Each structure stands twice: as C-alpha cells, then as structure tokens.
Image (cartoon, rainbow, N blue to C red):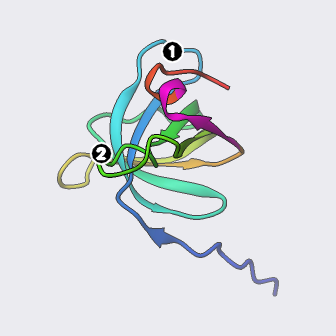
Amino acid sequence: MDCVTRAPRFSMGIPIFWRRRGDATWSDAVSVNVSRSGVLVRAEESPFMGAEVELIFGLSWHPDQAAQLADLICHGRIVRADASQLNGRVFAATIDSYAFIRQDEARAGVSV
C-alpha cells in the first residue's frame, strides 16, 4: 500500500485579498492554515470548486512593519469549499505558483 505524506500545515491568521482569476474586484479573507501546497481560508463568500484564484498574503500589512517588506501573490485553484462553518465560509486553494510583490503593488491589486 502506498502512503502519501501530507505537507505539514502551519496555523497562521494572515490577512488575504483574493479574487477569481480575471475578476477586477478583490475580497478580504484570513488564512486559517497554510502549507507548501495550499492554503485554507476563512471568508464571507467562497468561490466554486475548480475556480482559478489569485491570493495576496498581506505579509507587510501590520502597522508596525517596515515599508520594505514584500507581500506574496499566489495563483491556484479551489479544491474545497464549505459554507457550513461558523463565523463565515472556508475554502481551500492550491498554491500552484507564487511571487513576491512590493507593498504598493499589492494594495493596488496588481496581478503577476
């Protein structure tokens, strides 16, 4: 029997902007946990299964952080969506690619 090792997950409540690929509008969310292969997100709404998404992890958004910190933009797709959670919906997205972007690019909603 083959055993597939699941990537370790790290609990992190990081602010996130997310949108369906091609959409102009970003939505706010918070990460629940993250691994090298994906992220679990808590949001007020969730995209449909299989949707391609862009996510910006707000690594520099803390008011005490230096302005030189970068944010992380990821591209992936939705692999799980659950509306039955308390305090909002959760969805899981793969992290298929990522890039670091400057704080001003992230706030402007730049897509890479």
In this view, which residue lies farthest toward the bottom?
Answer: 1
Name which residue lies at 58% across and 64% down: 35
The quadrant the N terminus occupies is bottom right
Name which residue lies at 68% across and 26% down: 112
Q: Position of residue 91 (x, y in %)?
A: 43, 47
Q: Position of residue 22 (x, y in %)?
A: 58, 15
- Sequence-earlier tag: 1 or 2: 1
Q: Nearer the viewer, mark 1 or mark 2?
A: 1
Instruction: Give the camera-side residue of 3 and 99.
Output: 99
Residue tagged by mark 1? 23
- Label 1 and label 2: CA atoms lie apart by 22 Å
Tag 2: residue type?
Ala
Tag 1–tag 2 contact (CB < 8 Å): no
Residue tagged by mark 2? 83
Is residue 112 one of those drawn in magenta? no
Give the label on residue 94, or none. none
Q: Is residue 36 left or right of residue 24?
A: right
Instruction: Give the camera-side residue of 100 and 73.
Output: 100
Magenta stretch: dominant secondary structure: strand
Q: Quadrant of residue 75?
A: top right
Q: Where 80 falls versus 13 (above or below)? A: above
Numbered range of the magenta stretch? 98-105
Q: Position of residue 52 (x, y in %)?
A: 61, 30
Q: Position of residue 47 (x, y in %)?
A: 44, 32
Please tell me how crowded label 2 is: few (under 14), some (14-19), or many (20+) other residues with Cα within 10 Å.
some
Q: Where 91 falls versus 46 (above or below)? A: below
Name which residue lies at 57% across and 34% down: 102
Tag 1: residue type?
Asp
Q: Is residue 97 left or right of residue 107?
A: right
Please tell me how crowded label 1 is: few (under 14), some (14-19), or many (20+) other residues with Cα within 10 Å.
few
In this view, which residue lies farthest toward the right?
Answer: 2
Q: Secondary structure at mark 2?
A: loop
